[in-house]
Amino acid sequence: MTYRLAVAVEAPQYSGLGGPLDYLSELPLPPGTLVRVPLGRREVPGLVWDAPAEAAETGRPPLSDDALRPVAQVFTALPPLGDAWRDLVAFTAAYYQRGLGEVALSVLPPELRKLDDTKLARRIARLRKALEQGGADAADADEDDGDGLEPADPANPAAAAPPRPAGHANEPPALTPDQQAAVEAVTAAASDGTFLLHGVTGSGKTEVYLQAAAHTLAAGRQALVLVPEINLTPQLEARFAERFKGRRLVSLHSGLTPAQRLKHWLMAHLGLADLVLGTRLAVFAPLPRLGLIVVDEEHDPSYKQQEGARYSARDLAVYRGRLERAPVLLGSATPSLESWHRAQQGRYKRLDLASRIGGGVLPQVRLVDMNLLPRTHGVTVALSPQLVDALRERLALGEQSLLFLNRRGYAPVLHCTECGWKSGCPHCSAWRVFHRGDRTLRCHHCGFTERVPRACPQCGNLDLQPLGRGTERLEEQIAQALPAARVARIDADTTRAAGALQERLAAVHAGEVDVLVGTQMVAKGHDFRRITLVAAVNPDSALFASDFRAPERLFALLMQAAGRAGRDARQAARSQMWLQTWHPTHPLYAALRRHDFESFAASQLAERESAGLPPYTHLALLRAEARTPEAASAFLDDAAACANEFPEAEQVLVYPAVPPPVARVADVERMQMLVESPSRAALQRLLAQWLPKLHALRAAHKGLIRWAVDVDPLGI
DNA sequence: AGCACGCCGACT
DNA sequence: GTCGGCGTGCTC
């Protein structure tokens, strides 16, 4: 007896390989079984999907049995991926317009494809044995997983975590009434649905996550906790590990070694881990007893994957929660306007944490009007005297300050005072950034790096001057203004080495730093206890950016940065957030001053509605890359013409192709075209018909390098 | 995407 | 005479 199987194979969506292909098998393999199948002249991984589709569904005539090839290899050691998991993958593939197998196989641990059934069986057996013998912590004691490459301690939670008040670490603290209400709502019997937990930094969102997870675990189910960035996992991991001693907690993110990632994934899939904590890719962790999904800092742009299947892990978490009847808890001090809007519509249940716990208050926001500063040689100083005085004051008190500037390097441009030459990148339409530390000019888009020229390459003038300022220069200026201060800088440049970030954070926690200078890296999540002053040195640039989401991002970033100050209630009353601005009357700053997310959100939503932007409309972005801008435009123009022939075009608006803010990167010209519709369904239908035509269209465009569609794009 | 087959230029 | 350029076409 032979059976016919539909198998999702690892191949792109093109040429009709997007859906499952039919194969033969001696055994009736259940859906979700991992296999290897022949495809053309090679053998590729695949996942048994379901019974073969009928001809009527696929529109293709059925192939006779003798046209089918048998499955090459079956992974019997791996329990089949569940129905809900496959549903999630199928939805992702359809919604983000990618191949089924492409999505399915890309969200499995890469290490899996390197093994055969025997090796996999051995690993699983070893894992089970280690867990039985060593109890809960055996997972990480088991070092030899075939690679022997577990790093010494890439993210030692203890080193990253700030010192916590000593006491009964295992005992949950008493909840405020708000927290109590939130936990009860999420954990109510038969609870499902999506909850938006809105609370400022320090209002105790994490405690709500912890206690909601405790309920889930007590009910014998698994909890999934998503965080935006790898950097934030150690801290949260430490808190969960501390609370849930005796439970098995695994992390899942791209910073793990391949062997670790496979092990942690297996522990989730086999039901051996109770808690999974990870970045966006963890939304696909198979969890047989999923009972709760937490998305921390749900507004964070990092949840959107920016290549391949461009999925939003937050949106998929919500979808998955519905599928698996598990409550989804989205937490943020500054929710995304999409989530906020849904809460207003009643589709999400809003839970508010009104104040900081321990009676802490939010830092006072002070605006420095840069227009009022004296100019020397027509240039205003980067640091206002008022701010320098405030920093000096903190220094005298032995308190810490944090200066936030979202620009690394010494200066964004170098220029010649004689002929006006500027340090452009020869391969990109962008400036090369002057890095003084290693005397280089570096392009942050393509990586092209050269030593700083001694003289102007155009006229030979020796006087090359930096224009503007980055964190490197800010650090230098602080050191000049406050010679006694111990200054530390945290940005991508100073934390490149393994463990460098943890080391620097530890120094801050230990009080070895007076002034911390950094990019948005330091604004996010880190729990600094002794900082009483936070300053945004130059936040204005995002105020008038062309991206309609720029104000939302700026508000979130500044709120988050402000949250770094006064986390210790004893100092909260004195803590301040300084903003140096040329636009002191801007409504965004006015709202920030009052810590008033609600009125900011209301005004932004009103603008979005009148401009016909998300969340009131739905967007997709078609991007094209080519040797010349003309070739990229030509493809997009043809694509637009093609789109307008579909019946859905009535409900869909296709905008003209425009270059993105940085049009050329690494000698590739980019153009993009926005597609907008008030109806998500109409947009989806159009995309589904459109993409196959675009694959065909590609052949007619020689200069085209690649194209891609981004559903629900973040930046436009 | 891979990986073929296929038909025209400079080399051991 | 071959090695090899990458142009079209197929993979259940």
Image: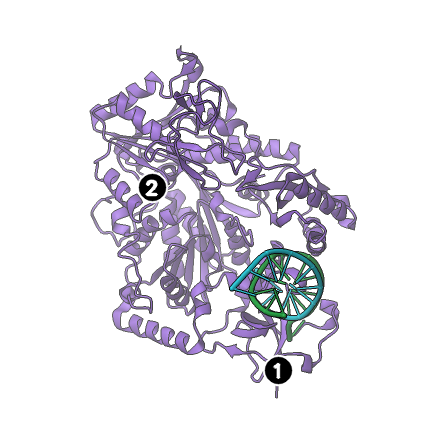
Chain colours: A purple, B cyan, C green
Question: Label 1's element?
Answer: strand
Q: Quadrant of residue A368?
A: top left
Q: Nearer the viewer, residue A64 or A1?
A: A64
Q: Position of residue A199 (x, y in %)?
A: 42, 40
Residue A526 marker:
2
Question: Label 2's element?
Answer: loop
- On the question of residue A190 being in view, the answer is yes
Q: Quadrant of residue A488?
A: top left
Disc 1 target residue: A3
Q: Residues within 10 Å of mark 2 (few under 14, many from 20)?
A: many
Residue drawn at point x = 29 percent, y = 72 percent:
A130
- Pick the quarter of the image with the C terminus of chain A: top right
Q: Quadrant of residue A494?
A: top left
Query: Relative to A290, does residue A37 appear above or below in the rendering?
Result: below
Q: Position of residue A572 (x, y in %)?
A: 30, 31
Q: Nearer the viewer, residue A271 or A281?
A: A281
Q: Residues within 10 Å of mark 1 (few under 14, many from 20)?
A: some
Q: Nearer the viewer, residue A268 or A517?
A: A517
Query: Relative to A117, does residue A653 appear above or below in the rendering?
Result: above
- Kindly indicate whether the residue at mark 2 contacts the one at mark 1 (C-beta within 8 angstroms): no
- Pick the quarter of the image with the N terminus of chain A: bottom right
Q: Position of residue A45 (x, y in %)?
A: 53, 70
Q: Nearer the viewer, mark 1 or mark 2?
A: 1
Q: CA distance from mark 1 to mark 2?
A: 55 Å
